[in-house]
Amino acid sequence: MPRPAKTVSVGRLLKPEGVIFFKGNSEKAEILEKLSRTLAEFNPGLDSQKLLEKIMEREAGISTVLDTGLAIPHARLEGIDDFKAVLGLIPAGYQDPKQPGLTVKAVFLFLSPNNSGFFKRHLQLLTALSSLFQPALIDCIISMDQGPQVVETVLSAE
Amino acid sequence: MNSSPSGPQGTGSLRVKQIVVLATAMLTFIPFWKASAVVLCDFGSSAFYAGGIAMQAFGPAFPWFIMAVMLFSGAMLAVYVESCSMFVRGGVYKVVKEAMGGPMAKVSVSALMFDFLLTGPISGVCAGLYMSGLINEMLELSGVHWAVPGRLFAVIFALMVTAYFWKHNIKGIEESSDKSVKIMSFTSLVGLVLIVWGAYTLFCRGFAWPSFSLEFNEHSLGWAKGVDWLKPIGALGILMAFGHSVLALSGLETLSQVYREMEAPKMRNLKKTAVLVFLFSIVFTGLLTFMSALIVPYESIKTVYADNLLAGLAMNMEGPQFARLILHAFVVMAGGMILSGAVNTSMVGANGVLNRVAEDGVLIDWFRHLHPKYGTTSRIVNLVAGLQAAIILLCMGNVYILGEAYAFGVLWSFVLETLAIIMLRFRETGEREWMVPLNLKIGNRLIPVGLLLILVLLLMTSTVNLITKKTATVFGLCVTAAFCSLFYFSEKINKKKARLIEESGSDEKLNLRYENEIISALDEISKPNRVLVAVRNPSNMHHLGSVLGTVNGEDTDIIVIHSKIAKGIQLEGETVSMGPEETRLFSTVVSTAEKYGQTVVPMLLLSNDPFYAIAQVARIAKVHQIVLGVSGSMGAELQLERLAMAWGAIGGSQDPGRPVAARVIWESREMSFQLS
């Protein structure tokens, strides 16, 4: 029987400046590009273009969109030793071409170290994210316009 | 907990909408002693008539030969064990088809059909003769100077029993193994009383061993009577007598039919069943026939008890007459039950074999037409019951004639089965779970000496029977030819259909139950531990096999699900249905479960996302493990990622104190994650 990994705190991964608000209508590609760029800005050494390529590579695989209104695009990278994350909020929502019919209103983009020892933490973060970002929380945070307020709400929801 | 679509406002939903529970696929597996009871209900019933028929054929040496045949049953049981170790859904048709191809398989099944058709009449008539014997005994004791016409009574009784089981099989009421256990318990008790009382009688009276002399009559010599060099001398006479006694082997095919339903560990239980059947046959059929010959005067057997030998044993015991009469009544009750059970087994067996053949597209669909009310293959049942009734009327209650016609199919199906296994030994040299003993290793080859000896004995007996058992040869060949022709022309007509079946992999009929709520579909789940296995590809069942091979079915429910992907998100107006792909997939699931002797709860779900479906069922069923096979297109890591996301989204990680592990299993590898 596999042993449970240590709990991952979603709120502690987020920085207020890592919360991006998308006003009006936005496309998936545009959102992912903006979030990748933001993540690279806060993490010197990360190339936003390469990062986006990695994210899109993963997006080509099995869907990361959930019916709760959350999408979790992510990539496993060499050269990092912990999670790196940003959150995009899209009150107008967007339709993922891979899953038409589902409206995405929150995008939690993250990176995790690409080593087998970290994979269980990676999976645990996915479970924690999908469990935490339920429709009520998403509806609440998309109505906000301040990063710190969002981070605080996420932390208190955990 | 609601399983209906429950996504947030403004978004779609990936939740399960409808579930199909495959009710007929939820096989119940039985322990070895129940399986033994099922086999013995057929195989053991010959104790009531084999001795008498053999005595009429070749005289006082009959108990030696019945015992010899019972000893030989050990060898045939070994052959069946080896064949079952290769094919869970085995039987002569499958084994012969694998080794020698379709045409010979059709011959073997046709020959077997001849014996299925005779088993019902011989059992029904014999039960009637036992009953009329008891009635006459009681009438005589009551001072009534009138006797029930035994054969007429037997014909009427056999027709009534056949009609009863015909109706029974049309309705599709399955004979439970519990009923077989009850019949065999009562029969064993009566047998035990007979043995103990018989031993006391022999102790009081002493005994002389039965004669070895063979006294063939004109009828039992068959065509040999006109050919001097075929006269019964030496070894040839022994073979002739053995051939006339071999009808006692009828019913062994039931072992391969019941193997499918045997619980895990299957092979060990099969071996236990074979040993139990063998010991019971030696004691019940062999010893009781022997005791009858030692206790009942030979003249009495010839004149009064040839058709109901064990009744003769009861009435000739040492003790007061009323006690013997009571014992006689118990013998008749036991005989009535086991022989009537054999009538049913013959009908079920014939129906099963013809259905199995029809699955291969070699029987026209007209026969597989389902009864509008009961959903059974009533036309096959009608055909079998009609032919059995005709045989009962034709024989006019003469059990010896039936006995003379008998054993053609048994012997030739044994010959073909043994030959097929020998051929498979040379063709498929890999490891087997069990092999018939006596194998000689020469270089890399394993020479199956044991099997070859069995084959030689079977071939010699079958050949001698062809000459001496005229009735069996003439009618056996006619019926075999008739069925072979039916199969041949059906196959021609059905060629297109057969191709379709081959493409879809299976034509198994599955009984479906539709549910809108997952919770309602989980009615059958009751054990403390639960494992969910998701299946998608019939060629990728390694993970299911791994679970079935390691999980203790006593305390663990194994839920096997397949999620059918719906078009569109909202699933509006869609209903789940079984297509050829799903039928093939679940047929593979059922045969894998049969192979391991584990019960599974198979379900088909309609969902947009298979991982959501897995997570939802796992949460509602409170499973401890979710097991997936590896997907070639996405890989184990992405599978676990998506499952982790779905698990969190449906709130799976919010259930406190209930650990759930996710495992992806493939050839010699496993990747796992503790979901909560």
Image (tube, helix red, strand yellow):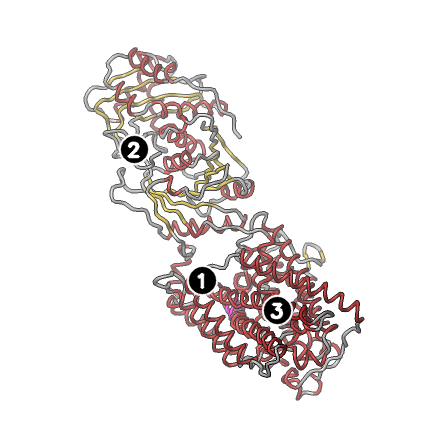
Q: Residues within 10 Å of mark 2 (few under 14, many from 20)?
A: some
Q: Are marks 3 and 1 on the same chain?
A: yes
Q: Residue, x 29% and y 34% (percent of image)? A: B13
Q: Give the magenta part as a residue range.
A: B104-110
Q: Residue, x 66% and y 76% (percent of image)? A: B54
Pick whichever, A69 or B247, lies toward us.
B247
Q: Residue, x 59% and y 71% (percent of image)? A: B412
Q: Quick check: can you spot residue B472?
A: no
Q: In x, y percent, where is residue B464?
A: 65, 77
Residue beneath label 3, please? B329
Q: In x, y percent, where is residue B480?
A: 51, 74
Judge left or right: residue B414 versus residue B675: right
Separation of disc 3 and disc 2 at Cα? Answer: 68 Å
Pick whichever, B140 or B659, lies toward us.
B140
Q: Secondary structure at mark 1?
A: loop
Judge left or right: residue B292 versus residue B175: right
Q: Residues within 10 Å of mark 1 (few under 14, many from 20)?
A: some
- The amino acid at mark 2 is Ser
